[in-house]
Image (cartoon, grey):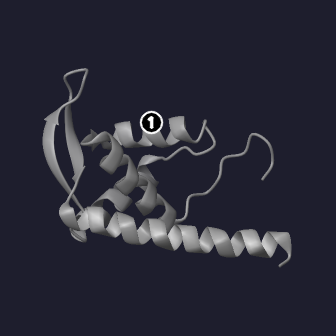
Amino acid sequence: MKEGSKADVLQGTLDLMVLKILATMGPLHGYGIAQRVQQVSENMLQLNQGTLYPALLRLEQRGWIDSEWGRSDNNRRARYYSLTAAGQEQLAVEAENWERMAGVITRLLQGT
């Protein structure tokens, strides 16, 4: 990756990040999730609405997250997303899959 370029986020990776953020931080609105991804990645990843909101809808349709309307810090109406019990289970599956894949990539890069 060139210095200063933004990384593309694969769908499965985005799902894992959203599930983990909600598990760690509790209910958040979409903008808060996007800000957290940007913060944790030290500005390497930036999610736009066209990427994040379809992912949130997909996760909700799968029963891994719930949503409800609430008020943001600046008193604007916002949809807040939270992890479900099924989402907590899926987070464990996604994390295990990520660890396995990261191990494969590491072995490939090391030439073993």
Q: Residue at x 33, y 69 (%)?
A: 90
Looking at numbered disc 1 in the image, what kind of residue is underneath it? Gln
Left or right relative to 111: residue 73: left
Q: Position of residue 58 (x, y in %)?
A: 31, 66
Judge the density around disc 1: few (<14), some (14-19), many (≥20) Cα neighbours within 10 Å. Answer: some
Q: Residue at x 75, y 40 (%)?
A: 4
Q: Is residue 28 above or below residue 83?
A: above
Q: Position of residue 14 (x, y in %)?
A: 47, 59
- Residue farthest to the right? 111
Q: Position of residue 30 (x, y in %)?
A: 33, 43
- Mark 1, residue position: 35
Q: Residue at x 36, y 37 (%)?
A: 32
Total number of numbered discs in the rendering: 1
Q: Position of residue 99 (x, y in %)?
A: 55, 68
- Residue farthest to the front? 112
In this orientation, which residue lies closer to the viewer: 56 or 111?
Answer: 111
Q: Quadrant of residue 34?
A: top left
Left or right relative to 41: residue 84: left
Q: Quadrant of the C terminus?
A: bottom right
Q: Quadrant of residue 66?
A: bottom left
Q: Residue at x 66, y 47 (%)?
A: 6
